[in-house]
Amino acid sequence: MMKNNNATPRRDFLKNMALATGTGFFLSSFQGNPSKKQKEIIVGHGDFTYKVDKNWGNQDPGKYPVNHCHEMVQDSKKRLILLTNHIQNNILIYDKSGKITQNWTLKLPAAHGLTLSQEGNEEFLFITDTDLHQVYKTTMQGKVLLTIDYPKEIKTYEKADDFKPTEVAVAPNGDFYVADGYGKNFIIQYSPKGEYIRHFGGKGDSKDQFDCCHGVTLDMRKPENPSLLITSRSKQEFKRFTLDGKHLETISLPGCWICRPVIKGKYLYFAVIVTVSWYDYDGMVVILDENNRVISLPGGSAPVYEGGALQKPVYDGLTFLNPHDVCVDDEENLYVPQWYSGKTYPVKLKRI
């Protein structure tokens, strides 16, 4: 993707706008220049403020190269697991200090979605690749246990290229749901063995359809009534469904091109990859409470509601470069991998 020649003036304009709307930060060297001494940046609002560390995950690109850093999860050993689409190392495993402890690859050219699955005392990973049109279940060491190809059971899928999976969510019974976010926009449910069960959604404008179902996650905040939260990114909204595919509600988030939803405790987190332009650096992190109200916008202007509707947030022009996901660790620090960011490593936001 070609970058906009007017990137710097636009960043300056947005930075001034963000200052005018109450975002708290101190000017810093832009990410990508870790040799420059970084001044302190504080982002976020209310009880959810963070100190930005752009150097936390930096590595020697000759040893641990990345292209796009797509998603991150934390496992039971408190390791931070990063998915990249560089075929030399699809997986980089960090300790909490930012040191790489392990790396491995499936040689996936378009690795996109990373989901951690807990089965008894064991953990597994689900990884999607949008170019190879497959979903993989692996051990934590990278051994492939299950491969899902395009769903021939669904008549609208005529060839592998129709299937471009972006994310997986795993239910308590082991069933898993694949979001075909860059393909036909269906959510496809499989048994733990990879057997097709059902599908729902598809591309469209009705309440039970999607326009880029980029992310899906299991919401267990009401354990007696689990549900699926699903991104409809081009519509700038989440949609909630039952586990058997019935629409429950739509959560509108104007100005936010949403990646995947992430649940931690009572709160919903997600990265906004873009607010204005796909051809320039942009984006922020958003935090919602259990009532679906935005309470903090790290990397953006303070949340404002008018007439019950969220007003479009403004990128601060400084903190992120197209964030693609957010990982919340056991201490409620945030780790943000970035897409199309000049091959940068994840940014850490330390909770204050």
Image (spheres, rainbow, N blue to C red):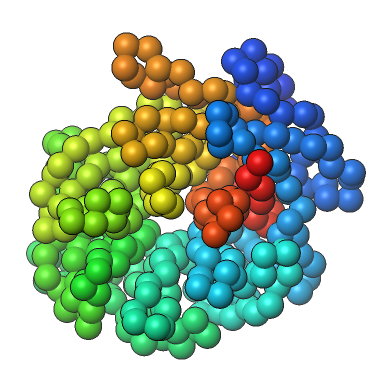
Residue at 19% x, 66% y is 189
Residue positioned 66% across, 41% down in the render: 352
Residue at image position (73%, 64%) is 97
Against 109, residue 276 (above or below) is above
Camera sees residue 44: yes
| Image vertical order of residue 347 relative to residue 92, above or below | above
Residue 249 or residue 70, whichever sits in front:
249
Q: Is residue 45 left or right of residue 266?
A: right
Residue 100 horizontal/vertical position (percent): 70, 72
Any part of residue 277 in sight = no
Residue at left 33%, top 56%? 217
Q: Position of residue 195 (x, y in %)?
A: 17, 78
Q: Position of residue 262 (x, y in %)?
A: 41, 51
Please indicate whether residue 143 sits to the left or right of residue 38 in the image: left
Q: Total number of numbered labels?
A: 0
User: As displayed, is residue 314 above or below residue 249?
Assistant: above
Tell me the quarter of the picture where residue 270 sits: top left
**Quadrant in the rendering for residue 58:** bottom right
Q: Position of residue 78 (x, y in %)?
A: 57, 69
Q: Is residue 234 left or right of residue 286?
A: left
Quarter of the rendering containing residue 144: bottom left
Left of 249 or right of it: where is 237?
A: right
